[in-house]
Amino acid sequence: MSDEHPTAIEIKGNPLVCPICKNDRFTIRHALLNTRATTFFGLDFLNKKAKNYVCSRCGHILWFLSAPGDAP
Ligand SMILES: [Zn+2]
């Protein structure tokens, strides 16, 4: 399984479209938001996994925090 191929993404039943170039193909990245800074500033809610969808056309990155209960 590869996340490298641009693919259509659906969020809660809605097709994801790049707000910049209206492209609908994205590559998927996973990010960990877990830094001392977030803890220091009381942003522990950010200490979780996030998904990044990178527009395959313009490179714009859309961030989504994984919802509770999401499979890791
Ligand atoms: Zn784009």
Image (cartoon, rainbow, N blue to C red):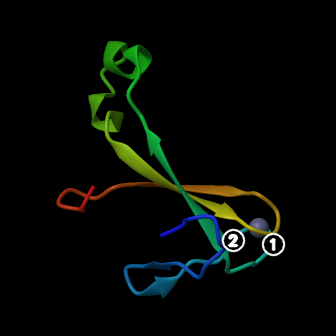
Q: At which x and y percent is residue 54?
A: 65, 60
Mark 1 residue element = loop
Ligand 1 image-quadrant field: bottom right
Q: Closest to the observer: 70 or 38?
A: 70
Q: Which residue is mark 2?
A: 18
Amino acid type for the residue under numbered disc 1: Cys
Numbered label attached to residue 50: none
Q: Is residue 27 left or right of residue 51?
A: right
Whether the residues at callouts 2 and 1 have beta carbons within 8 Å, the answer is yes
User: Ligand 1: does it lie within 8 Å of the C-beta at label 1?
Assistant: yes
Residue in the image at 47% along x and 70% along y? 1
Q: Quadrant of the C terminus?
A: bottom left
Amino acid type for the residue under numbered disc 2: Cys
Residue in the image at 34% along x and 12% along y? 40
User: Ligand 1: does it lie within 8 Å of the C-beta at label 2?
Assistant: yes
Q: Residues within 10 Å of mark 2 (few under 14, many from 20)?
A: many
Q: At which x and y percent is residue 28?
A: 55, 62
Quarter where residue 18 is shown: bottom right
Numbered label attached to residue 21: 1
Q: At which x and y percent is residue 61?
A: 65, 55
Residue in the image at 30% along x and 21% along y? 42
Residue in the image at 54% along x and 67% along y? 2
In this rendering, the count of numbered labels is 2
Quarter where residue 49 is shown: top left
Vertical order, 27 against 66 (above or below) = below
Mark 2 residue element = loop
Q: Is residue 19 left or right of residue 67?
A: right
Give me the C-alpha separation between circle 2 and circle 1.
Answer: 6 Å
